[in-house]
Amino acid sequence: MKSLLYILFISVSMSVWAQEKNTLKVVNWIWYIPVDESLPKSLPVSKRSPVLQEFEKQFNCKIDYVELNTEEQIYSFVTTKASDVDVFNLPTSYMLKLKDQGRLSKLSQVQAAQLNNWNSILQRAPYNQLGNYGFPYSGGTTVIMYRKQWARENNITAVNAGHVFKPVKGTRIALLNSSDSLVMALNYLDTPEHTADKKDLKKAVNLIRILQDNNYLKSISSNLEDTAAKMVDGELDIAFMYHSDANQFLREYPNELAIEIVPKNPDFYVDFWGVLEQSKNKKLAIEFLNFLGNKERQLNIAEELGSIPMGKFSEQELKEHDILFPHEALRNARTYSLEHFELCGKIWRLLLKELKTKEKPDNETP
């Protein structure tokens, strides 16, 4: 009887081990993998995404896919629930933190196949500081999304930072995260070099405070869908956001919304895939990254998401795939040091705390 129980125990243990070994645990931003919009949203993302379905079929595996709204949520998940993560997606500043903490696995097997195929912007700091510890997935820049009816009513043909920080009377503005909003403020101030300069950042924060004090600032939120819905309903006029996120709303509301890329010296961000050092499934995680790095797949994903593929592509290839923001436009783009992002985060948290104590009723006229 004991022998039978022992055999049963071993059989169950082996079955669980095999199942875990064949399951890839992926953590990603919301909307950062293409899905079939015709399928019910009640289905898991892994069942709605042709990309994930193709990978599962090709490698005879299962993907456990977790979708989160903000970089802070992903970072918290990765650092507090590491046993539930194999591969994840985060922006450069958070990836560098994880690298310094010794949490990232080296991706030599991935980079060996992809190293010569990356866009040259990845050679700039801080992206080049990741070395073999990050796999570039997508890039983009800050845009101003605005309500078309608002622009028509105010005879505005091109929206820029000036319309945000010196808005026409009655304009209602949403800020969606620290780096977008502070960078836009710095653009408006025409600061020549955007390093971790406390004086520049304080000036930018003061501009945002002025918006709130004069009742232009109506929302500080990471809820993109709620912000877009309020714009379509006429409750908001302008919002800062990443252009890949804005592109999703342009497809959904082409008659109501439009975007403008920051006209000069746009900021540029890159999101990287990482593999945790303690992942039990590194081999499958590496296969996943190589799978995503396929040239045609990069273009198709970027076209679906409205992002910029990180590989080297000709202008013709980008046009054929209707890429929103061509690589040529990156020549004047700015990148930021880790210290700059950390300082932005600190100031932003202080600003949020202060604004919450100063909230004014929506019916107050500026």
Image: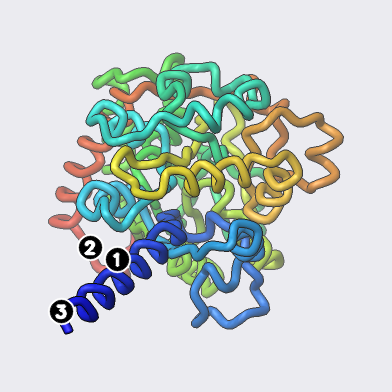
- Under circle 2, the secondary element is loop
Determine whether 194 is above or below 240 in the image: above
Residue 186 horizontal/vertical position (percent): 41, 28
195 or 73: which is nearer to us?
A: 73
Which residue shows up at 21% across the image and 73% down it? 6
Near-viewer residue (282 or 353) = 282
| Residue type for callout 1 | Glu
Does residue 213 show up? no
Asked if 331 appears above or below 97 in the picture, the reply is above
Colour option used: rainbow
Mark-to-mark CA distance, 3 and 1: 77 Å
Residue assigned mark 3: 2
Vertical side of 11 occupied by 122: above or below: above
Q: Are marks 1 and 2 in contact (CB under 8 Å)?
A: yes
| Image spot of residue 211 (x, y percent) | 33, 47
Image mark for residue 360: 2
Within 10 angstroms of label 3, few (less than 14), some, or many (20 or more) residues? few
Disc 1 residue crowd, few under 14, some 14–19, many 20+, Cα 10 Å = few
Q: Tell me the SS state at disc 1.
A: loop
Q: Tell me the distance, in whole angstroms, between the alpha carbons under discs 1 and 2.
A: 7 Å
Q: Which residue is depicted at the point 51% across and 46% down?
A: 242
Q: Position of residue 233 (x, y in %)?
A: 52, 74
Of circles 3 and 1, which is in front? 3
**Rendered-image quadrant of the C terminus:** bottom left
Camera-side mark, 1 or 2: 2
Point out residue 131 in the picture as x, y percentages from the top left corner: 45, 21
Residue in view at x 49 percent, y 26 percent: 108
Residue at position x 80%, y 47% from top?
321
Q: CA distance from mark 3 to mark 2?
A: 72 Å
Q: Which mark is residue 364?
A: 1
